[in-house]
Amino acid sequence: MEEKINKELKQLLKKCDARLDLLEKEYGLKTGLSEWLEFRGISRRSFIKWSAIMSATLMLPPIFTKRVARAAEIAPRIPVIWLHFAECTGCTESILRSANPTIADIILDYLSLEYHDTVMAPSGEYAEKSLYEAIKKYKGNYICICEGSIPTNNNGNFLRIGTKAVTGLERAKEVVKDAAAVISIGHCASYGGPQSAYPNPTGSKSINEALGINSVIIPGCPYNSVSLVGTVLYFILFGKLPPTRGGRPIFAYGKRIHDTCPRRAHFDAGEFVRTWGDEGAKKGFCLYKVGCKGPLTYNNCNVPGWNEDISSPIRSGHGCIGCSEKAFWDKMAPLEKPIEARTLPGIEAVADHVGWTLVGIAVAGMGVHAIYSHFKAKSVSRQGEKPCCKSEDKE
Ligand code: FSX
Ligand code: SF4
Ligand code: F3S
């Protein structure tokens, strides 16, 4: 068995090296990323350390570290056309506005962006010209990144783009058809976003739904830049997009927020924050009772974390609102109430009643677990033993 794995790994490494050689030959060895990182105060050592973390994030063995570094250096030469549709531009802004950009942010910033509404220098007709030239020049070789949803009601008139005033759907179709790979980023492009919340007057749809395609989706409102960079690096290393579940890369969305949560021990011990700023909040207890949707949400916000692991929503003191899950504005609302106490727009019913059909057995498991934890903590206290973390807030 081990022999078989070794043989497969060797073959994979060989394929990967051959691809990187080819790309370097095609796009040139020196892309200037190292100098640019240095200019931004990031040493070679930090870059290699980051490459090791990225290898682990992509679920690759350590032997890939140097190859990930090579892929990152090639990334700025892969042509990218970045489209914007109906959205708040928060996804792009979250990279552009960071005071201390991460290496992932810098790589995205440094990509060979042939077209990007928000950051490109040309405007008006010149911008349109750049777009059509890029589609022609890099036909079949560019990555198309889509940000924002596509409004489909009223013949798509809720969104018209550029000097020719094409609809979002028309723009998406003309760019997507000649792309080597399509990646939909943010909740809007992945699932329709807040504008598709009930009653969705603009008929906003995800890229996949509007175009009938199967792009890889990187949901989140906004998305985590490490997930997009990981997807691009995987494409450079292996010439294909990473394995997915429900369209989301498994390396980034394979686990629930609840599975990797730093407050999980408190959940298991029945120690909850009950009101904002209470003793439990000061002690870093579980946020389930103030609405955390971590048990229903798949994303990598805890590991590898946000902004090179400086923090994450839960570490900063607020529960997860489920921003990487389909229709979270409707299904997870109210965002600061526990799952079992919420109501749904248009359907006046508590989640205990309808939740099972909406979020499935996960909620059922959660409810039982929460009740179990609550009684477990109570019975431990009753026996005069100390629960694993003492809390005045425990019921
Ligand atoms: Fe949507 Fe992103 Fe939320 Fe905003 O582009 S995911 S509304 S952060 O900007 O698409
Ligand atoms: Fe963490 Fe939320 Fe789960 Fe509590 S409910 S352990 S805060 S993910
Ligand atoms: Fe979104 Fe929850 Fe992460 S709110 S950013 S998926 S912790």
Image: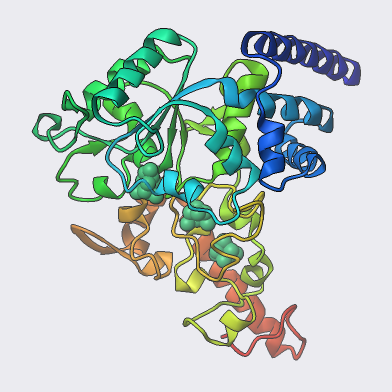
Numbered-mark total: 0
Q: Is residue 285 above or below residue 37?
A: below
* Position of residue 346 in the picture relative to residue 221 (left or right): left
Q: Residue furthest left?
A: 154
Counting from the top left corner in percent of width and height, residue 122 is at 34, 30
Q: Residue at x 43, y 48 (%)?
A: 93
Q: Residue at x 66, y 46 (%)?
A: 40
**Viewer-nearest residue: 150 or 355:** 150
Q: Position of residue 214 (x, y in %)?
A: 41, 23
Residue 236 point in image, percent of width and height: 63, 20
Relative height, residue 336 to residue 216 (above, below)? below
- Does 201 sit left or right of 311 as displayed? left
Q: Tell me where residue 44 appears, x and y as whole percent.
A: 79, 39
The single residue placed furthest to the right in the displayed view is 3
Q: Quadrant of residue 387?
A: bottom right
Specify the color scheme: rainbow
270 up-or-down from 183: above or below? below
In this rendering, the answer to whether 143 lies above or below 227 is above
Mark yes or no: residue 58 visible.
no
Q: Is 132 positioned to the left or the right of 101 in the image?
A: left
- Nearer-the-camera pick, 135 or 250: 135
| Quarter of the C terminus within the rendering | bottom right
Does the rendering let one see residue 356?
Answer: yes
* Residue at horizontal 18 percent and vertical 35 percent from the top: 159
The N terminus, quarter of image: top right
The residue located at (48%, 47%) in the rendering is: 96
Q: Nearer the viewer, residue 350 or 218?
A: 218
Where, by quadrant of the figure, is residue 160 drawn? top left
